[in-house]
Image (spheres, rainbow, N blue to C red):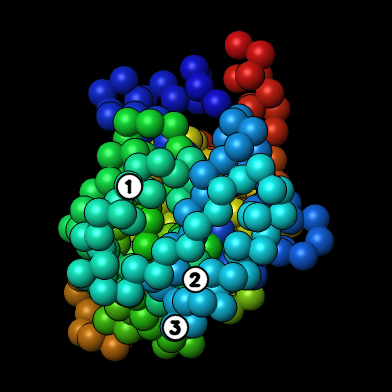
Amino acid sequence: MKNHLTSKLKNRIIPKGLLVAIGGKEDKKHELQILSTILSLVKKQKKNIEIITTASQHPEEAGREYYNVFAKDSDHTVGIMNVSTREKATDVSLLKRITAADVIFFTGGDQLRITSVLGGSPIEKEIFRKYEEEFCIISGTSAGASAMSKTMICGGDSSEALRKGTINISAGMGLIDNVIIDTHFVERGRFSRLMEIVSMNPSNTGIGLGEDAGIIIEDGCILKAIGSGITVILDGQYLHYTNVANIRSDEAIAIENLVIHTIVNGYGYDLCEKKYLKPDDFEKDEVS
């Protein structure tokens, strides 16, 4: 997915790795469409896969669940990292495993556990280095996906959203900038809370990942949808008006002309060009 789909990347640092963000509740028992796609992106027959369970309140259970999926092929080396403290985030043996990994997978849970434990740590820095300098896959589901962006949603009830100050945001890992990723998006009715965040800073593109929906992000710019679910894109570039700066906390937010797209398996979106991509666009790019 290069060439004409990435025409605005000349002045950007283009990461060599790929991000795969998943909206949660992906299929782990049947066709495994999303999880098998992650493995297929790495061309090596024998892959080193590390599962990071930091976000989970039940790390052993979460780690075992994904271990059982990724270890089905005996050629792969699969490890589980329960990095539960800041001290563990400096562990040299764990750091070496990150360096050797082809796939680094973050389980779901609470995204604040990821950022508070790993933020600024040697493990996080090595993940950044690999993503920028080597071909590798950084993937996460639910909280693991939400934490990828520079700014992340870390709380707020959907039923109270679109009232100023009701959604909590925090610094994320920062693997990708100028986006906000929300998960379980369609099933939990989270349209209004992502609309609120985009209205406050329309330069951020809102990405709402439904369940069993994922996106591959190449060059930090080109999204391609995978899975059976729906991904919603909230594009604020044509926003005409919002009252968010002029109202008091808890007052209702007015928004004029926020553009909404949905993408499904095979469709995509160019974050740099702010352009909707159809399957033909990817096919043309592969031919060129």
Of marks 1 and 2, the one in the foreground:
1
Of marks 3 and 2, the one in the foreground:
3
Marks 1 and 2, how far apart at CA: 23 Å
Q: In the image, residue 203 lies at what x, y percent?
A: 31, 50
Amino acid of disc 3: Gln
What residue do we see at 35% from left, 42% from top? 99
Most foreground residue, 239 or 224 = 224
Q: Which mark is residue 108?
A: 2
Q: Which element carries disc 2, helix, strand or loop?
A: loop
Residue 11 lies left or right of residue 45; in this view the side is left
Q: Earlier in the sequence, mark 1 or mark 2?
A: 1
Q: According to the image, label 3 marks what residue?
A: 57
Q: Which mark is residue 255?
A: none
Q: Earlier in the sequence, mark 3 or mark 2?
A: 3
Most foreground residue, 225 or 76 = 76
Amino acid of disc 2: Gly
Label 1, residues with CA under 10 Å away: few <14, some 14-19, many ≥20: few
Q: In the image, residue 120 lies at what x, y percent?
A: 18, 58
What residue do we see at 60% from left, 30% from top? 43
Q: In the image, residue 107 lies at what x, y percent?
A: 50, 66
Amino acid of disc 1: Lys
Residue 135 makes an appearance in the image: yes
Residue 204 makes an appearance in the image: no
Residue 43, compared with residue 263, is above or below; it is above
Marks 1 and 3, how far apart at CA: 25 Å
What residue do we see at 38% from left, 49% from top? 97
Of marks 1 and 3, the one in the foreground:
1
Q: Earlier in the sequence, mark 1 or mark 3?
A: 3
Which quadrant does the N terminus fall into? top right
